Amino acid sequence: MSTTVFNNCNLFVGNEDKVLDNAWFCVDDESGRLTKLGTGPAPKADKNIDLNNQYVMSGLINAHTHIGLINADKNHYPETETLVTYQALKDLKNGLRGGVTYIRSCGVSFDVDVKLNKMRDSYPFEGPQIKPAGMPISIPGGHADQNNKNAAHLVNSPDDVRKAVREQFKKGATNIKLMATGGVMSQGDDIDDTELSLEEMKMAVKEAHSKHMTICAHAEGRLGIHYAILAGVDSVEHGFYVSDEDIELMKKQGTFLSPTLIAGHQIVQYGEGKMTDFSYQKMCKHVDAFYKHVGKAIRSGVKLALGTDAGTFKNTLENSAKELTELTKAGATNYQALRAAGLGSAELLHIDQDYGSLEVGKYADFLVLKNNPLRDVSSVEQSDKLVYQHGQRKY
């Protein structure tokens, strides 16, 4: 068994609010998993890599992404499966460069994420590991109803929902995405429009969980959030107007919140004149409430995952680390933000036995940074950071 020792580093394991100084860790070169770690003199190994007293943390797990998302106005091409696939592969490669080593997909046209994930062993490509969803579930005229018939399952009853979940299961999806409310980017609704019914969401959760799939809900308006939580989704995405009562219910049930604050921030900062005024004004109208309610949920102790809505306006997968800063602006501690990007997202995705922290037995997916992320989470945005996946340097 060939082993590599990474030594002379400051190690943020990810399961405690502390950094181990003068640390080292061993990686089995064949499996890509950590076999030992400690502080002080490092053990002998087949290979030794000196990390020059830099900081090491687990790779980012982004729990809300849209790889391959095409802005037709920008690209001047219709959304085709070929174009979505081409863009998705670019997104994945750039995302890994930015330090993202695992993603949960939350809606991709033509089920491109599912197809790429299934073919990966035979036709390898560079990028994070994927928990795919394929097409989301929406009502006609809802947040995911587009001109492209391959963009979403459009449903009108619990029976329609059950069929949609089963179809995604058959294709190979391991996550289901529900559109519980209207959204910012959709042009025919507002964020407090309640779209999927409680009965429809209950059916989706029942079907998904019976097949060991995770299920998440785009939910921005108060009533839609409430229905999603009552239905038993694993995570609420965005949560603009999550109520105090629902915060307590989320804590009781163990429901995660994946806020995607950076998506709203980018629209407000850069969207004027660059997107429809309808969407820009919607985000400006609701952004303060977005941060306020998310902050209250974070401070109350709701389980937190890191998601960015990557693929939306000026919000690339490569820049996922920017969400860490936005979470701290909303009220998260540095450790809460970093844990969301590691163990929080890993627990939500049910992959924490293998990912999310640099504990012995887990895969050696890690970043090497010049500065301490526990002191300043913006350190993770370092453009020339080293990125390792399963113990192999990728960037």
Image (cartoon, grey):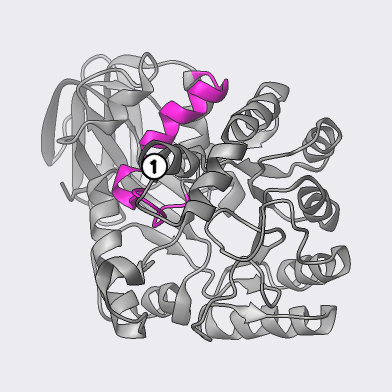
Mark 1 residue crowding within 10 angstroms, few (<14) / some (14–19) / many (20+): many
Q: Is residue 36 above or below residue 309?
A: above
**x and y percentages locating residue 359 in the rendered image:** 43, 35
Magenta run includes residue 331: yes
Q: Is residue 99 above or below residue 313?
A: above
Is residue 211 visible in the rendered image? The answer is yes
User: Looking at the image, which residue is at 88% across and 68% down?
Assistant: 199
Residue 380 painted magenta: no
Residue type indicated by callout 1: Leu
* Stretch of the chain drawn in magenta: 309-333
Location of residue 15 in the rendering, given as x and y in whole percent from the top left corner: 51, 28
Q: Is residue 232 above or below residue 16?
A: below
Percent of width and height locating residue 226:
82, 48
Percent coordinates x, y for residue 351 in the rendering: 53, 52
Determine whether the residue tagged by mark 1 lies in a helix, strand or loop: strand
Q: State the residue at coordinates (76%, 65%).
A: 195
Left or right: where 384 falls relative to 175: left
**Which of 363/317 is in front?**
317
Residue under circle 1? 60
Q: Quadrant of residue 116?
A: bottom left
Question: Could you tell whether 345 is left or right of 23 in the image?
Answer: right
Horizontal side of 108 relative to 138 (left or right) equals left
- Would residue 121 be seen by someone viewing this image from the given angle? no
Residue at the image point whose x is 36% and y is 84% from the top = 81
Q: Between residues 372 and 187, which one lies in front from this camera angle?
A: 187
Q: How many numbered tags mark residues here?
A: 1
- Which residue sits at x=38%, y=17%? 19
Residue 124 falls in which quadrant of the image? bottom left
Quarter where residue 367 is shown: top left
